[in-house]
Image (cartoon, rainbow, N blue to C red):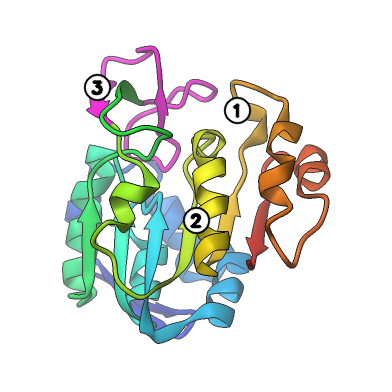
């Protein structure tokens, strides 16, 4: 068992359950030594609330979900990569996270759309590597058809939500309108990772009206243009 403590949280990962996760050893070395997405955990420290619910869209194998589960009343983990889901379930169990529910569907702008999920179209690779994505075309034998959900579907039975994290390899392009309106209407905090270079439509300024709903950041579009793979913390 890989047991370690990072960002003041104890993790326990069973290596056997990660046999299909490419670069698992690399990730473990990076994460356990404090060299993986430290800015994410700095944001988490700002918004943690033991009386609220957090939503992690793009949960992968659980490094962020497990942290959130120790600092929120409940966590909703959204992940569509079936290889990653298997490891995620194992990691939640071994890390004693009983307050996490998992939604095994990709988030999109409409419910029940039939699409393809799998290897990243820009960097083709195996499932489970954290870069799989929602798309329209099959490019790998591992790709498979999925039925999509919306943010409204996720929130339907959620209570006391205060924070949403989004990291879905370009899929954020399709949910920005609903995501920003929902956060604004409910005063949720948002940590969103952009993958702008992978968007189908590079006209990011079409979202300016939605970006303007954020209270703590201006010129989000310009920031993303200058750093296409940036992450931004927003309050509403």
What residue do we see at 49% from left, 67% from top? 186
Q: Give the label, 2 or 3, closer to the camera.
A: 2
Is 135 situated left or right of 98 in this image?
right
What residue do we see at 39% from left, 69% from top? 54
Which quarter of the image is occupied by the C terminus?
bottom right
Is 225 situated left or right of 46 in this image?
right
The label number, if any, that marks residue 148 in the structure image: none
Assign a secondary structure to mark 3. strand
Q: Which residue is mark 3?
A: 144
Q: Where residue 25 sits: x, y (%)?
A: 39, 53
In magenta segment, residue 128: yes
Q: Where residue 137 sits: x, y (%)?
A: 39, 12
First-in-chain label (2 vs 1): 2
Q: Which residue is mark 2?
A: 182
Gap between marks 3 and 1 measured at Cα? 20 Å
Gap between marks 2 and 3 measured at Cα? 30 Å
The label number, if any, that marks residue 198 in the structure image: 1
Residue 35 visible to the viewer? no
Q: Which residues are magenta?
A: 118-147
Assign a secondary structure to mark 1. helix
Pointer 1 local density, CA inside 10 Å: few below 14, some 14–19, many at least 20? some
């Amino acid at each position: 068992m890989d047991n370690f403590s990072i960002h003041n949280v104890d993790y326990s990962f069973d290596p056997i359950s990660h046999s299909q996760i490419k670069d698992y050893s690399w990730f473990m070395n990076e994460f356990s030594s404090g060299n993986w997405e430290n800015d994410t955990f700095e944001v988490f420290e700002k918004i943690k609330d033991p009386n609220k619910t957090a939503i992690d869209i793009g949960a992968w194998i659980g490094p962020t979900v497990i942290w959130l589960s120790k600092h929120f009343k409940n966590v909703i983990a959204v992940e569509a990569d079936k290889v990653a889901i298997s490891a995620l379930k194992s990691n939640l169990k071994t890390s004693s996270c009983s307050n996490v529910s998992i939604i095994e569907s990709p988030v999109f702008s409409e419910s029940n759309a039939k699409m393809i999920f799998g290897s990243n179209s820009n960097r083709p690779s195996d499932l489970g590597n954290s870069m799989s994505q929602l798309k329209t075309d099959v490019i790998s034998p591992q790709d498979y058809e999925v039925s999509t959900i919306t943010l409204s579907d996720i929130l339907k039975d959620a209570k006391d939500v205060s924070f949403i994290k989004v990291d879905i390899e370009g899929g954020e392009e399709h949910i920005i309108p609903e995501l920003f309106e929902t956060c604004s209407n409910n005063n949720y905090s948002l940590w969103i990772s952009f993958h702008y270079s992978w968007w189908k439509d590079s006209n990011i300024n079409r979202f300016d009206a939605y970006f303007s709903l954020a209270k703590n950041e201006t010129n989000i579009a310009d920031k993303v243009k200058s750093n296409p793979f940036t992450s931004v913390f927003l309050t509403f």
